[in-house]
Amino acid sequence: MTTEIQPEQRAADLAEAPQIISALRRQVTRGRKHWFVSLLEAIGRWHLPEETVNGRTYRYLIGGEAFDWLLLAERLIQAIDDRVEPGERDSLLFRYRFPTEVTDEEFRRLIGPAKYRAHLNFFYGVLVEEALQLAVEEEVHKERLATRIWENGRVEDETHHRIYGATRDELLASFREQRALPPADQVSLTELREFTYWLFKERLHRCDPARVASDTRKGLARLNQIEAARRLKRPRSTE
């Protein structure tokens, strides 16, 4: 998957997408393997880095190298939704829990090595980075409560300054300038994820290796806490 594709290649990928979806639906209807396995195989054959469906833009490849496979899974599940048990679907999309046992090596084989590497880029560059920001934001909150400091600027600015050396607005302006994007009051979810991945790469470039490793461990620890809390929540009854 790449964002640098020629018009004729994009046309071919656009034409291929409905074929992949139709094949996925046929496989799930036959029921010879679990729908999730068929879904991962379809993801492995997918080439479009982004598309717009019913007015919604799906950008599966962040920054040209970070693959949001779960967003593509959400898109493909729409084609087989009547064949998927709602509890399994919701558990996958909202709790990141596989509906059947798939090892890490099987997952890598089903989606392909290139997409797997891009998936790891997304995991560390977006999910772990978001968790790192949350962890530092919570530290700032605790410090302000402990010292009764309420007026010292926005928490998110202090959070970003500690991690990246500048306020969020300054960083967002630099990001948009580098990408030749116009200034805007709002940040869409798609742009936010692009921005987060850009921040991740800026952190790798700016910080020394020991600091990078320490911050990454902090982000991983907070992400594990979030996932543990999700596992404690029981899925709603589908009856």
Image (cartoon, rainbow, N blue to C red):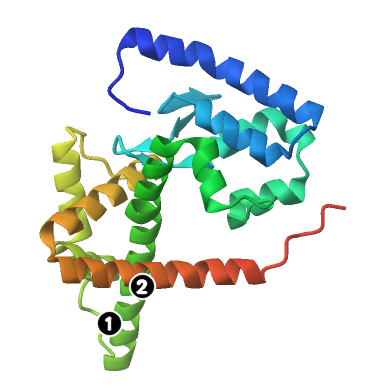
Q: Amino acid at mark 1?
A: Trp
Q: From what the image shows, is residue 121 above or below residue 127?
A: above
- Choose top left, top right, bottom left or bottom right for residue 30: top right
Q: Residues within 10 Å of mark 2 (few under 14, many from 20)?
A: some
Q: Is residue 102 left or right of residue 195?
A: right
Secondary structure under badge 2?
Answer: helix
Measured Cα–Cα span from mark 2 to mark 1: 19 Å
Q: What residue lies at 37% left-to-right and 41% top-to-bottom?
A: 118
Residue 135, label in figure: 2
Residue 33, label in figure: none
Residue found farthest to the right: 239
Q: Is residue 110 left or right of residue 185?
A: right
Q: What residue lies at 53% left-to-right and 52% top-to-bottom?
A: 104
Q: Say which of 40 and 96 sits in front.
A: 40
x, y (%) of residue 7? 33, 10
x, y (%) of residue 163? 21, 67
Q: Say which of 189 and 78 sits in front.
A: 78
x, y (%) of residue 211? 18, 70
Secondary structure under badge 1?
Answer: loop
x, y (%) of residue 157? 22, 66
Q: What residue lies at 42% left-to-right and 71% top-to-bottom?
A: 222
Q: What residue lies at 14% left-to-right and 39% top-to-bottom?
A: 177
Q: Residues within 10 Å of mark 1 (few under 14, many from 20)?
A: few
- The quadrant of the picture occupied by the N terminus is top left
- Choose top left, top right, bottom left or bottom right for residue 147: bottom left
Q: From what the image shows, is residue 126 above or below residue 213?
A: above
* Residue behind mark 1: 150
- Choose top left, top right, bottom left or bottom right for residue 27: top right
Q: Amino acid at mark 2?
A: Ala
Q: Earlier in the sequence, mark 2 or mark 1?
A: 2
Q: Count the numbered circles shown.
A: 2
